Image (cartoon, coloured by chain):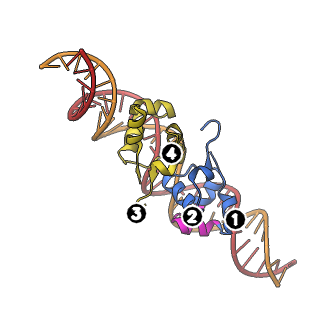
Chain colours: A blue, B yellow, C orange, D red
Amino acid sequence: MKNTIRVERAIKNITQGELADLIGVSRQTINTIESNKYVPSTVLALKIARVFNKAVEQIFELEEGD
Amino acid sequence: MKNTIRVERAIKNITQGELADLIGVSRQTINTIESNKYVPSTVLALKIARVFNKAVEQIFELEEGD
DNA sequence: GACTTTTGTAAAGTTTGTTTTACATTTGGT
DNA sequence: ACCAAATGTAAAACAAACTTTACAAAAGTC
């Protein structure tokens, strides 16, 4: 699965740490999700999408093999 | 977090086992998600939403405390 | 009321997500 | 070049998701 968190952060001009605070997780959680090291839970995906005022599907996209 | 999987299944008239096969997980995974015993990964949420032709937000909704 | 399908539940085990801490690297500003 | 802020990375510990197996309960069919 891929995501556009980095782009959305750039648009909103917030850091990984600020996004982490907004949704109540550690900065490393944001960093590892952004780096596609982990697939976040649906709760996190919903919160992240909400921060950016986008649908989950606009930020997280399935890939071959998912 | 709550979800409307049971309703969507009823509309599509498929069993837990059939949904599980469609998205490639065990029946118990569907059962426990439906019972709100745990929060699925974003990959699962996207796959489930896709089966029902709905947005993730139409099936999974954040609650107080999430 | 027996039979079949579907659903609920539970325990053990494996994998994966998340936190915490800490440090290295990069980037931006001056 | 220096400094500060942001990002990358990594290891250990813990929490949660997911699988497998198995059985009990419920619901639908005849």
Amino acid carrying label 2: it is Val
**Which of the chains bears the disc numbered 1?**
A
- Residue designated by label 2: A51
The image shows residue D23 at horizontal and vertical percentages of 25, 29
The image shows residue A62 at horizontal and vertical percentages of 61, 42
Range of residues picked out in magenta? A16-28
Secondary element at image label 1: helix
- Please tell me which of labels 3 and 4 falls first in the chain: 4
Q: Is A17 contained in the magenta span?
A: yes
Residue at 57% x, 65% y is: A20
Mark-to-mark CA distance, 1 and 2: 12 Å
Marks 1 and 4 belong to one chain:
no
Amino acid carrying label 3: it is Gly
**Which of the chains bears the disc numbered 3?**
B
Disc 3 vs disc 1: which is toward the camera?
1
Contact (Cβ within 8 Å) of mark 1 with mark 4: no
Residue at 60% x, 70% y is: A18
Contact (Cβ within 8 Å) of mark 1 with mark 2: no
| Quarter holding residue D22 | top left
- Residue designated by label 3: B65
- Residue designated by label 1: A11
| Quarter holding residue B18 | top left
Which quadrant does the C terminus of chain A fall into? top right
Mark-to-mark CA distance, 2 and 4: 19 Å
Find residue B45 and name its label: 4
Residue at 59% x, 64% y is: A27
Q: Observer-nearest residue: B20 or A40?
A: B20
